[in-house]
Image (tube, helix red, strand yellow):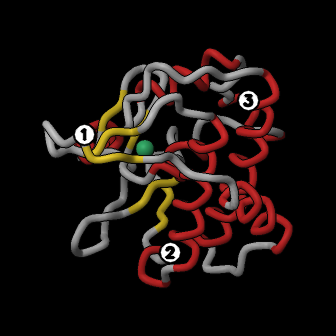
Amino acid sequence: MTHSNLRWRFVGRPCLDFAMTGGRGEWARFERLSRPADLRDWFAQGPLQLRDVCVDADELRAACDLREAIQRIAFALLARQRPAPEHVAVINTFAAAPPLVRALDPTTQMLQITRPVRVEALLSELARDALALAADPDARDRVRQCESPDCALLFFDDSRPGKRRWCSPGRCGDRARARAYRARKASR
Ligand SMILES: [Zn+2]
């Protein structure tokens, strides 16, 4: 599933989507989680559409620590390298917190997330997703970096042939094809 709005991009793998919301150092210029309200918005717009999560400053800091560790691990997977133990340790710690609780609604026969939802549980889910990615040899070979020069987001290639080149075929794929078309025309 791929969807995005002006602020966030959700291109199919929660831990990677989360890892691409900014960061420290060279990633600071992409920072989108500056305030607790930003993280709240990410949870609201994300795949789970949780609109009633309260986030405080400490939780935002914790989220950014987790995000940095996921980023480091994702880039290691992209380079076919073993992730550094200190980053794995951070993710293991977050994953050890209790995850979301889901209960079956007897009327709708659908799973409902039990309220209230704690940020710790959401970070645990993201950490577990990252661990599952790193532990699955087939999945970790499908971590890619978007080939669009003005994007460079990491994404998970869930296409059957595993040859996806852009984080989102609509956005970066269309732009890349338009660029290639212009380049062909100019070279004639
Ligand atoms: Zn892209």
| CB contact under 8 Å: marks 1 and 2 | no
The local crowd at label 2, few if under 14, some if 14 to 19, many if 20 or more residues have their Cα within 10 Å, is many
* Residue 168 in view (yes/no): yes
Ligand 1 within 8 angstroms of badge 1 C-beta: no
Q: Name the residue under label 3.
A: 60
Q: Residue 170 carries which label?
A: 1
Q: Tell me which corner region of the image, top left, top right, bottom left or bottom right, holds residue 114.
A: top left
Residue 183 seen by the camera: no
How far apart marks 1 and 2 lie (CA) works out to 24 Å
Asked if disc 3 and disc 2 are in contact, CB closer than 8 Å, the reply is no
Residue type beneath disc 1: Gly
| Residue type at tag 3 | Leu
Tell me the SS state at disc 3.
helix
Q: Mark 2 points at which residue?
A: 140
Q: Which of 40 and 29 is in front in this view?
A: 40
Q: Which amino acid does label 2 sit on?
A: Arg
Residue 57 placement, left or right of 37? right
- Identify the residue at image location x=78%, y=40%: 26
Question: x, y percentage for residue 29?
Answer: 72, 28
Q: Position of residue 154 (x, y in %)?
A: 52, 53
